Image (spheres, rainbow, N blue to C red):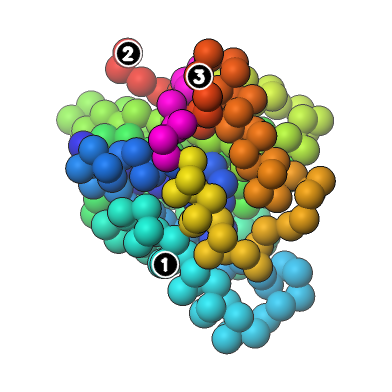
């Protein structure tokens, strides 16, 4: 099985589905990751050195989880609304043509972060079911400190309809986030190790297991 994870910024891919990535790769599925925007610059950090270091962290985290290839598209951090969405769609179409995924994991559409919103919409457009083309299942993930804060933007809340048991994989997700230590925060910030574990336990409790990552299946053959 070919799996493609399309995330807006470095660390979104781990926060959203890091344990699931490791579960796929452990089953010998081919997992590829695309990071669409740079990160950092919206916080005023335009240092080329720091942006490069963040990319190195992303590559190291992906390697830890068994990712086959990671691609950086280098779009402007939190400024993706300044370019036509067609450009984003075309980039994602190119990724789909390159990796030929059976499943795409990406952002939930109702999210506080504008880049997350646009990536979600662009994935839906690029992977639309066209006759004669490969059907792609789309699974949308939640990102702490972003998805849960986007509840008043006029769209539905994140209500998962797929739970993946990651009780045996959570330690790898935490290890991957430790590589991204510059992006993590202290408890009780939602992007802290304690809350990451707590969310997995909460999602697990919703389906009767120890730990889970939850997704909204936007499109599936059933």
Quadrant including the C terminus: top left
Tell whether 38 sits left or right of 189: left
Q: In front of the other: label 1 or label 2?
A: 1
The x and y percentages for residue 79 are 66, 61
| Cα gap from disc 3 to disc 1, whole angstroms | 29 Å
Crowdedness near tag 1: few (<14), some (14–19) or many (≥20) residues, C-alpha within 10 Å: some
Q: Secondary structure at mark 2?
A: loop
Disc 1 or 2, which lies upstream in sequence? 1
Question: Residues in magenta?
Answer: 161-169
- Find disc 3 in the rendering and name its residue: 209
Q: Nearer the viewer, residue 37 or 162?
A: 162
Q: Is residue 166 located in the magenta-colored stretch of the structure?
A: yes
Q: Nearer the viewer, mark 2 or mark 3?
A: 3
Query: Does residue 152 show up magenta in the picture?
Result: no
Q: CA distance from mark 2 to mark 3?
A: 23 Å
Total number of numbered labels? Answer: 3
Query: Percent position (x, y) of residue 88?
Result: 48, 54
Residue 60 has which mark?
A: 1
Give the residue pinned by disc 2. 222
Name the secondary structure under disc 1: helix
Is residue 137 left or right of 179 when viewed as pictured?
left
Examine the image and state in which quarter residue 183 appears.
bottom right
Check whether the beta carbons of the residues at disc 3 and disc 1 lie within 8 A of each other: no
Q: Quadrant of the N terminus?
A: top left
Q: Nearer the viewer, residue 14 or 42?
A: 14
């Amino acid at each position: 099985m070919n799996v493609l994870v399309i995330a807006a910024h470095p660390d979104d891919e781990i926060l959203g589905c890091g344990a699931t990535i490791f579960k796929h790769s452990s089953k010998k599925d081919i997992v590829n990751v695309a990071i669409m925007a740079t990160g950092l610059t919206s916080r005023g950090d335009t240092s080329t050195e720091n942006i490069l270091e963040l990319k190195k962290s992303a590559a190291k985290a992906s390697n830890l989880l068994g990712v086959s290839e990671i691609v950086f598209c280098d779009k402007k951090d939190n400024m993706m609304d300044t370019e036509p969405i067609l450009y984003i769609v075309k980039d994602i179409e190119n990724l789909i043509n390159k990796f030929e995924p059976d499943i795409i994991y990406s952002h939930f559409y109702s999210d506080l972060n504008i880049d997350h919103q646009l990536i979600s919409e662009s994935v839906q457009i690029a992977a639309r079911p066209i006759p004669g083309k490969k059907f792609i299942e789309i699974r949308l993930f939640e990102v702490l400190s972003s998805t849960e804060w986007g509840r008043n933007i006029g769209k539905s809340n994140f209500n998962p309809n797929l739970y993946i048991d990651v009780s045996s994989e959570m330690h790898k997700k935490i290890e991957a986030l430790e590589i991204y230590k510059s992006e993590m925060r202290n408890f009780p910030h939602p992007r802290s190790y304690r809350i990451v574990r707590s969310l997995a336990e909460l999602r697990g409790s919703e389906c009767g297991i120890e730990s889970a990552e939850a997704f909204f299946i936007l499109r599936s053959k059933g």
